[in-house]
């Protein structure tokens, strides 16, 4: 099918007005995120069954018609593995498409395989092989080549036929609301902001540090996240995580000490070295002046808790039974990561879910009525927020 490249506000308004009349539209995005914290939107693909268009957000002054389409709850937006697309829309427009039918999630619910790729889905449902040759390209460069545009068009063209097959089967199974609610939960997670003072929670091996070292890591991780947000830089392009951890572990007290960290970027040391050393000094002073009972507690691991393995096994039995009762694969109901998220939320006073104002996945949206009574019986009443 022939695509049309949309580069003006007038063209966009015409396209979106027509798309508003459809029951569903297929969407995809192309973006660049090589060194940045956030994705930079380069192209939006839209197919509504009648018009296949490639929207150039870099050329169009007024994207409001597209925003209105995204926010129209009467039109289903069909995407495949939409997590990064959602983030791209939130970054570009501070809004998200709703409701979203994610064809990858639908495939998982229908036991077509976990994390099914778009090309494989199209092959299974449409018997068509797609060329993925342009997947790694600079979508912010202009002009875009014909090969890039054709690739982008194909990335959305077959979504509606796939949706039509999948939606009827998911509807028949009574699980369409699972998809809509799962994506709404995903949006909540994307909108949530990790408080900078808790950025240390996501640093690998943080559990190895004592309270003083962890206080230093807390300061360094907060600074790194703040800098990344201000400059829109990927975290490791500010200062690599492993090097940040080592600086805290060794309580480094000089720029020359920083430079001796194996593999450290010396340009980063020149740029940020003075700041990092000052932060380390201030964090150590803060630790020394803080009464022992008020100092930052060391990070606990689930594996360090004696009842962890037994409790996780019991949760897995519950999850497997819920999956069996609902005729879906167990991973759709709850992954090991999601069960661990629940246990951290119950057992730890500080965890990544709680500090972002979120609830564990298994106690949210469609999973909540399936799990709540079992979780309460096994773990007790939910901890205070």
Image (cartoon, rainbow, N blue to C red):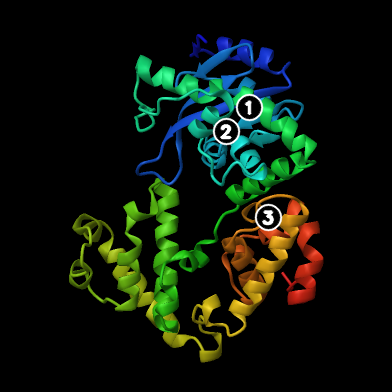
Residue 261 visible in rendering? yes
Q: Which residue is mark 1?
A: 67
Quadrant of the rendered image containing residue 266: bottom left
User: Residue at coordinates 71% horizontally, 40% vertically from top-left?
Assistant: 180
Q: Nearer the viewer, residue 39 or 47?
A: 47
Image marks 2 and 3: residues in contact by CB distance under 8 Å:
no
Which mark is in front, 2 or 3?
A: 3
- The quadrant of the image that shows the C terminus is bottom right
Q: How many marks?
A: 3
Q: CA distance from mark 1 to mark 3?
A: 32 Å
Residue 144 visible in rendering? no
In the image, 28: left or right of 229? right
Dot 2 or dot 1, earlier in sequence: 1
The percent coordinates of residue 29 (x first, y second) are 50, 30
Dot 1 or dot 3, earlier in sequence: 1
Above or below: residue 128 compared with residue 346: above
Which mark is in front, 1 or 3?
A: 3
- Tell me if mark 2 has few (under 14), some (14-19) or many (20+) residues whose alpha carbon lies within 10 angstroms of its own: few
- Tell me if mark 1 has few (under 14), some (14-19) or many (20+) residues whose alpha carbon lies within 10 angstroms of its own: some
Above or below: residue 264 compared with residue 208: above
Q: Which mark is residue 333?
A: 3
Looking at the rendered structure, the secondary structure element under dot 1 is helix
Q: Which residue is mark 2?
A: 93
Image marks 1 and 3: residues in contact by CB distance under 8 Å:
no
- Tell me if mark 3 has few (under 14), some (14-19) or many (20+) residues whose alpha carbon lies within 10 angstroms of its own: many
User: Residue at coordinates 42% horizontally, 65% vertically from top-left?
Assistant: 221
Q: Nearer the viewer, residue 31 or 60?
A: 31
Q: CA distance from mark 2 to mark 3?
A: 32 Å
The percent coordinates of residue 139 (x first, y second) are 39, 28
Q: Which mark is residue 122?
A: none
Q: CA distance from mark 2 to mark 1?
A: 7 Å
């Amino acid at each position: 099918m022939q695509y049309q490249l949309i580069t003006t506000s007038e063209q966009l308004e015409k396209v979106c007005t027509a798309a508003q009349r459809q029951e569903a539209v297929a969407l995809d995005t192309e973006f660049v995120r090589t060194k940045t914290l956030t994705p930079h939107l380069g192209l939006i693909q839209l197919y509504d069954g009648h018009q296949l268009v490639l929207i150039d957000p870099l050329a169009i002054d007024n994207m409001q018609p597209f925003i209105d389409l995204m926010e129209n709850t009467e039109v289903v937006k069909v995407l495949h593995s939409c997590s990064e697309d959602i983030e791209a829309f939130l970054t570009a427009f501070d809004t998200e498409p709703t409701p979203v039918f994610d064809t990858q999630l639908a495939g998982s619910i229908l036991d077509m395989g976990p994390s099914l790729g778009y090309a494989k889905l199209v092959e299974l449902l449409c018997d068509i092989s797609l060329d993925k040759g342009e997947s790694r390209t600079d979508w912010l460069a202009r002009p875009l080549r014909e090969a890039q545009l054709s690739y982008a068009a194909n990335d959305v063209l077959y979504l509606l036929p796939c949706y039509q097959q999948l939606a009827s089967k998911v509807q028949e199974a009574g699980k369409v609301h699972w998809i809509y609610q799962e994506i709404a939960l995903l949006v909540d997670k994307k909108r949530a902001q990790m408080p900078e003072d808790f950025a240390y929670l996501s640093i690998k091996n943080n559990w190895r540090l004592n309270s003083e070292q962890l206080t230093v890591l807390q300061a360094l991780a907060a600074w790194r996240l703040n800098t990344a947000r201000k400059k829109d830089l990927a975290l490791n392009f500010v200062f690599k995580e492993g090097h940040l951890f080592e600086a805290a572990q060794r309580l480094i007290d000089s720029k020359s000490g920083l430079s001796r960290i194996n593999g450290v970027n010396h340009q980063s040391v020149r740029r940020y070295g003075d700041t990092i050393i000052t932060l380390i000094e201030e964090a150590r002073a803060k630790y020394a002046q803080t009464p022992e009972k008020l100092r930052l507690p060391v990070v606990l691991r689930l594996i360090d808790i004696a009842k962890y393995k037994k409790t996780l096994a019991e949760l897995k039995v519950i999850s497997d039974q819920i999956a069996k009762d609902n005729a879906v694969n167990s991973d759709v109901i709850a992954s090991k990561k999601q069960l661990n998220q629940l246990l951290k939320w119950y057992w730890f006073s500080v965890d990544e879910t709680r500090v972002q104002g979120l609830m564990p996945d298994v106690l949210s949206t469609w999973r909540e009525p399936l799990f709540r009574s079992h979780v309460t019986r096994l773990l007790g009443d939910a901890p205070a927020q």
